[in-house]
Image (cartoon, helix red, strand yellow):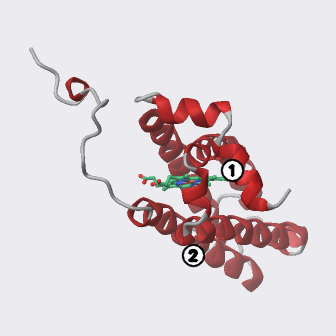
Amino acid sequence: MDIPGIVQLIQASAPAEWMRTSLKAMPIVEAIHVLAAATVFGTILIVDLRLLGFPNTKRSFTRISHEMLRVTWTAFFVSVLTGGLMFAANANTYYGNTAFRLKMLALVVAGVNMLIFQLITYRTVGRWDTGVRPPIAGRVAGAVSLTIWVSLICLARWIGFTKGYNFDVPNDVDLNFQFPTQ
Ligand code: HEM
């Protein structure tokens, strides 16, 4: 089966149907997605800044990265799960959206950058773990990672503004949910 066929199947799946028909599913899932994304970015920011030598090199790099990356991976798992649910709800539209495609590409590039760092630069960490500025390859990995993650978040926000607007209130929306009466 080709990719558009798979996308079609995803959109017709039961979780996708649930995301579309429940009034509260999308806002709740998106809120969890944003919290998970903030945790992914926040923890990666701490590790990347340490690679760049900020705020200092007094604390062990391996200790900071071990402590942070455990949280990063958990939050990443949550963001993939919630992102997948949001994608499923409107898979055809997201699949054709350039910002969405670039966001997925940014995820792959972030992964490749991390892998190169782990397989090459991290092997020498014993020499620069504490009290020494990380080598140029480490600083480049940190700067590249920060650039990719900031771009990814901008692209993610962009999706919402490029997938079409509908300012009409649908007939089946309960406005009392938004404006409670006494
Ligand atoms: C496979 C993984 C992921 C998928 C499939 C995915 C999918 C989505 C989808 C469908 C949206 C809704 C866009 C819209 O209609 O407005 C979204 C929004 C967003 N995503 Fe993801 N996402 C994933 C991972 C991530 C990660 C890892 C991050 C950041 C660390 C992230 C950050 C965001 C942000 C900041 C938004 C915008 C929320 C808003 O509009 O307020 N996503 N994502």
Name the image quarter holding residue 103: bottom right
Three-letter code for the amino acid on which mark 1 is drawn: Gln
Which numbered marker is on residue 8? 1
Q: Nearer the viewer, residue 103 or 115?
A: 103
Q: Residue shown at 76%/72% (left/top)?
A: 113
Mark 1, other Cα within 10 Å: few <14 / some 14–19 / many ≥20: some
Instruction: Choose the circle earlier in sequence order: 1 or 2.
Output: 1
Q: Quadrant of the C terminus?
A: top left
Is residue 111 toward the left or the right of residue 19 in the image?
Answer: right
What is the residue that sits farthest to the top in this orientation? 182
Q: Secondary structure at mark 1?
A: helix
Q: Residue shown at 70%/53% (left/top)?
A: 7
Is residue 171 toward the left or the right of residue 161 in the image?
Answer: left
Which numbered marker is on residue 147? 2
Report whether residue 59 is seen: yes
Which numbered marker is on residue 81? none
Mark 2, other Cα within 10 Å: few <14 / some 14–19 / many ≥20: few
Q: Secondary structure at mark 2?
A: helix
Question: In the rendering, at what x and y percent does residue 52 appear?
Answer: 62, 75
Report whether residue 73 is seen: no
Question: In the rendering, at what x and y percent does residue 169 appear?
Answer: 25, 41
Question: In the rendering, at what x and y percent does residue 66 appear?
Answer: 75, 49
Q: Of the residues tagged 1 and 2, which is closer to the observer?
A: 1
